[in-house]
Amino acid sequence: MRESVKSKQSQSNGFTILELLVAVSVTAILATLLLNITSQVVSTQTKASGDLETNQVAQFVLDRIQEDLHCAFARNDGNVWMAATIQSQIMDGSDWKKVENLANGKPVEQSLRIKAQDWPESMQNEKIIAEGQGALGDSRFGKAGTWFRFFTQSPELDSTIQNLGGIRAVGYQIVRFGLTGSNTSRPRYQLFRSDVTPKETFNAGFNLHPQLGNYNSGTSNLSRVPGNIMNPIYQTAEGESPTGFSLANNVIDFGIRAYLIDRNSKGTGNLRQIFPNIEDTTEDYEFLASTHQSYMKDPSQPHLNAFPEVVDVMIRILTTEGESAISAFEAGLTPVPSNYDNAEEYWWDLAEKNSDVYIRRIKIFSSAI
């Protein structure tokens, strides 16, 4: 009798197979929910961290450009006092480091969105067609972005320079180069700010014409000389290539839109875009602020060469994860997924998913005198 009671107690204290299956199922569901929640939290944290990172870089860059543009300077003497060139193509060379897998580099054709027809059909709408261009945040300014240069009286950063309030030439451009001049330094897309000393600027003259000015060449091994406007990667006598002009890393696009203010009798006005000139059929996206008729593409429209009053600045910055993804793809370590037609499309898809765009409208306080 006692053995029978013990047997029944033993059976009642165990679990049936059905109970075990239910327990395992509930545990699996809870684990899946916990995993999803954790994944979402990590993804949100990563995105927030990336946004904070790019925002800090963008504010630093835009503050620097704003300070320079607020103090931009020009004279109506026929020289070129401001110039901008959209570099749709660029030769890979010693200064613009080649991509390891050339087919996976930043594309040429898909990196240009200036006029309405440059936008893909999927993005075309009545506003783009009517305005002749898409939104600035969706624009693309070529393989090497916009090469932007002008003269400024912004505060001098180097306190050892004489004539701290003098006019000097500055230039902004993207170069794919290592963080140092070492051959082992991994190339990154960097925004450089060339800054010529007031003395060197005065000696070179005040003309930023890409061919006729004295800022289009230079092999000096010194920093802050006129040739740095063309090429900020100079080589010292010791064979080094300092990157002291680098303003920010992982800037994969940089562009501007320049405007005049059409004022009316009420004291208000509208912005009239003068660069890029979306009505130009030559697709030669170059802007020269000058009163010299020989520098003008169309002397009947001198406003297209006027010194701008307002400039919109756009920069696109990769997150740290985006920089790693782009670098791996350009090195050929990541294949093009089967659902993409080509490497060019995938490059920009990677870039847009892992970058942020920042825009600032800047008023130029000084005008041509």
Image: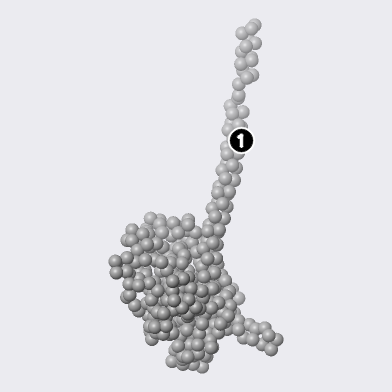
Q: Is residue 97 visible?
A: no
Outermost residue to the left: 238
Quarter of image, res 208: bottom left
The residue positioned 46% from the left and 71% from the top of the image is: 159
Residue 198 is situated, as x and y percent measured from the top left of the image, at 44, 79
Q: Which residue in the protein does label 1 denote?
A: 26
Q: Amino acid at mark 1?
A: Val
The residue positioned 51% from the left and 63% from the top of the image is: 57
The residue positioned 59% from the left and 35% from the top of the image is: 27
369, above or below 142, in the image: below
258, above or below 247, in the image: below
Residue 35 is situated, as x and y percent measured from the top left of the image, at 56, 43
Q: Quadrant of the N terminus?
A: top right
The residue positioned 54% from the left and 61% from the top of the image is: 56
Residue 13 is situated, as x and y percent measured from the top left of the image, at 63, 19
Of 15 and 47, nearer the camera is 47
Quarter of image, res 104: bottom left
